[in-house]
Image: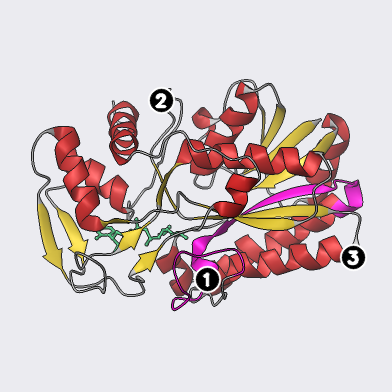
Amino acid sequence: MTVLVTGGAGYIGSHTTYALLDRGDAVVVLDNLSTGMRAHVGERALFVEGEVSDHALVARLVSEHGIASVIHFAGSIVVPDSVKDPLGYYQNNVVASRALIEACIKAGVKEFIFSSTATVYAEDAPQPLAEGSPKAPISPYARSKLMTEWMLEDTSKAHDFRHIVLRYFNVCGADPQGRTGQVSPIPTHLIKRASLVALGRIPHLDIFGTDYPTPDGTGVRDYIHVTDLANAHLIALDALRSGAASTSYNIGYGRGLSVRQVVAAMGQVIGRPLPVKEGPRRPGDPPTLISNPAKIRAAGWTPHHDDIAEILRSALDWERRFNA
Ligand code: UD1
């Protein structure tokens, strides 16, 4: 039973591909390399360069490789870019996903896992967020994810097809074996930027907002190691394989860390204080995003890397290796 991983050359897709290969699953990766890197795809996967919206290609891959399940990562992910180019985001994330889902239905693929985001929830929803918490996405990126969730829900009702949606919180860190990690042309994520400051590649870290209604005034997030996130996909895949009904899961640790706590932890890891500059809030950033992971834990997910020092060390190791 081969798994088709779309976007398998990207950050989370390449980690999930390694998680699948490491336990012996056969994997076909479909990626257009618009942001992903061929070198980050595990050698034992079959790599195909192409578009997820290419019906004929998906049909051929399904029949040639006996694909029974699809894990769909491919898409655009930068929130501010989605505000500037909403139609591009709806094309890449909604229209392309629709084509892929249709190709799956026609080819007889019955199991589908979709990467979604914690930003589909309403900003004023009580924390921690459970799967049933109110949804009110603001950015075109988050809306495109929720639209695709809805397409999957409706498709699962109408066809012999089941899906699992995974809503990611703040994904960070890199493969402990150093095989893959995050690559961003213009890094915006806190831990990525903190790593670049720690390595002296940028002079200081901007702290975006110190007047949030949080214990130390800075934004609080549920930072989750990408390896634990990748393993959640294996749980979801096994659930679908054993006949589980369509559903959604939050993937986070259920604990929040503030920007200042992350900065202090990085200071401890590198043995000196991280240079920071306090500034105003970044537009659109909510004060707090914390997951309630009870549901995925009950499904058998046990995180192994819930340690901010370990996350930061893996991010730093990756930055050193990638730029070496
Ligand atoms: C990220 C993802 C989003 C995902 C969400 C899930 C992007 C751009 N964002 O958003 O897709 O759905 O996680 O929770 O892909 N901060 C600083 N200084 C910096 C960078 C960030 O103070 O240089 C602060 C931010 O204000 C925020 C926190 O750090 O409070 C985390 O920011 P970031 O790493 O950018 O992630 P999110 O914006 O939470």
Closer to the eye: label 3 or 2: 3
Magenta region, residue range = 105-132
Which residue does the image show at 48% across and 51% down from the upper left?
Answer: 252
Return the residue at label 2.
178
Find the distance from the CA under tag 1 to the CA under tag 3: 26 Å
For discs 2 and 1, the disc positioned in front in the rendered view:
1
What residue sits right under mark 3 in the picture?
158
Which tag, 3 or 2, sits closer to the chain's start? 3
**Residue 106 is one of the magenta-drawn residues:** yes
Answer whether residue 189 is visible to the viewer in this image: yes
Disc 3 residue crowd, few under 14, some 14–19, many 20+, Cα 10 Å: few
Are dots 3 and 2 in contact, CB under 8 Å? no
Q: Which of 3 and 246 lies nearest the eye of the viewer?
A: 246
Residue under label 1, please give it. 121
Q: Say which quadrant the C terminus sits in.
A: top left
Labelled pair 1, 3 in contact (Cβ < 8 Å): no
Q: Which of marks 2 and 1 is nearer the N terminus?
A: 1
Tell which tag, 1 or 3, sits nearer the viewer: 1
Q: Position of residue 272 (x, y in %)?
A: 8, 38
Amino acid identity at mark 1: Tyr
**Image side of residue 69 versus residue 74, left or right:** right
SS at circle 1: loop
- Beta carbon at label 1 within 8 Å of ligand 1: no
Residue type highlighted by circle 2:
Gly
Instruction: Check disc 3 and report its element: helix, strand or loop.
Output: helix
